[in-house]
Amino acid sequence: MTAEILDGKMTSQKLLEKLQQEVSTLTKKPVLAIMLVGENPASLIYVNAKLKKAESIGFKAILKQLTSNVTEKEIIANIKEWNNDPNINGILVQLPLPKHINKNIILNSIDPIKDVDGLTAYNSGLFYTGQEPYAIPCTTRGIIMLLKEYNIEIEGKHVVVIGRSNLVGKPTAQAFLFENATVTTCHSKTENLESIIKTADIVVSAVGEKIVNGKILKKNSVVIDVGIFRTPEGKISGDVEFESASQVASYISPVPGGVGPMTVTALMYNLLDLYLAQNIR
Ligand code: GUN
């Protein structure tokens, strides 16, 4: 058996066309402000993709680049300016930040109603207590959107999330709980990881290492690959050994072209949600 591909690129195109139509009816263009600190080459690629996509949907997008020796105080001053600027609807601080910067202090300085990544303590607190945040993290929203587009049942299923980051693992586990799945979160200290993965109806891998393959998957499981890294040979790779996994799984998301485009799409949906929240307040 060969698994059906969860095509994030095609699904994104479809969802973004819908979004673009909605955006064209707005009286003002929603504005996304992105902050990039330092010279991480991967971050620069991601940020450029976000800026380009935002403009193509009919949003306005601005970028503030700061050098890696910037202070927390300077970053926060900039964010406060954006918080107070009524023309800016969404603020995104691209991660990772340089080591001398306290990520949580920076993220928590974003006004929650402009927190387009849903990473402030305020929005996370609402999310993890079953209340309604202004936004949830983009990769998480993108994964759920992708599964729903393929009509994949989530309720009652055993979902194994590998990874416990605030950016992907934790919010993704929470989103699946919200969808009434039974959720297990695994991480680098988990014992018997392979036998746990074997019990999963849906596997979400967000590790950055090749750890999932056909041998450890349950037959007909759904595999979501969030990992993206470069192999020593310079090839872009995900966490999942695609060839063997696709012989066992019923659905599988590829890398690239799976979760990546869905993350950007979810960011665009988050921005519209924030814009609407700000314009009825
Ligand atoms: N770095 C990698 N993914 C993300 C993301 O979704 N949001 C932010 N802010 N930084 C990231």
Image (tube, rainbow, N blue to C red):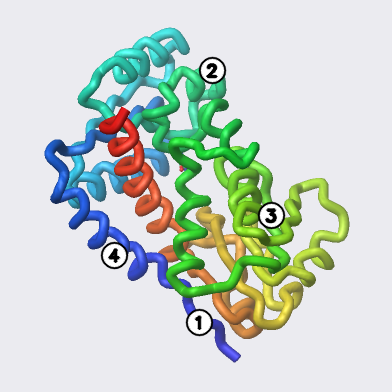
What amino acid does circle 2 point to?
Ile
> Pointer 4: residues within 10 angstroms few (<14), some, or many (20+)?
some
Q: Quadrant of the N terminus?
A: bottom right
Most foreground residue, 6 or 28: 28
Q: Quadrant of the C terminus?
A: top left
For the residues labelled 1 and 4, say whether their Cβ atoms are less than 8 Å apart.
no
| Residue found 21% across the figure and 53% down from its top | 22
Mark closer to the chain start, 2 or 4: 4
Residue 191 location, x and y as percent?
87, 54
Report the mark closest to the observer, 4 or 3.
4
| Residue found 73% across the figure and 52% down from its top | 185
> Pointer 3: residues within 10 angstroms few (<14), some, or many (20+)?
many
Mark closer to the chain start, 1 or 3: 1
What amino acid does circle 3 point to?
Ile
Q: CA distance from mark 2 to mark 3?
A: 26 Å
Left/right placement of residue 61 relative to residue 111 reads left
- Residue denoted by label 4: 13
Residue 88 location, x and y as percent?
25, 27
For the residues labelled 1 and 2, say whether their Cβ atoms are less than 8 Å apart.
no
Residue 248 location, x and y as percent?
66, 83
The local secondary structure at tag 1 comes to strand
- Residue denoted by label 3: 162
| Residue found 46% across the figure and 74% down from its top | 150
For the residues labelled 2 and 4, say whether their Cβ atoms are less than 8 Å apart.
no
Mark closer to the chain start, 2 or 3: 2
- Residue denoted by label 1: 4
Mark closer to the chain start, 4 or 3: 4
Mark closer to the chain start, 1 or 4: 1
Mark closer to the chain start, 1 or 2: 1
What amino acid does circle 1 point to?
Glu
> Pointer 2: residues within 10 angstroms few (<14), some, or many (20+)?
few
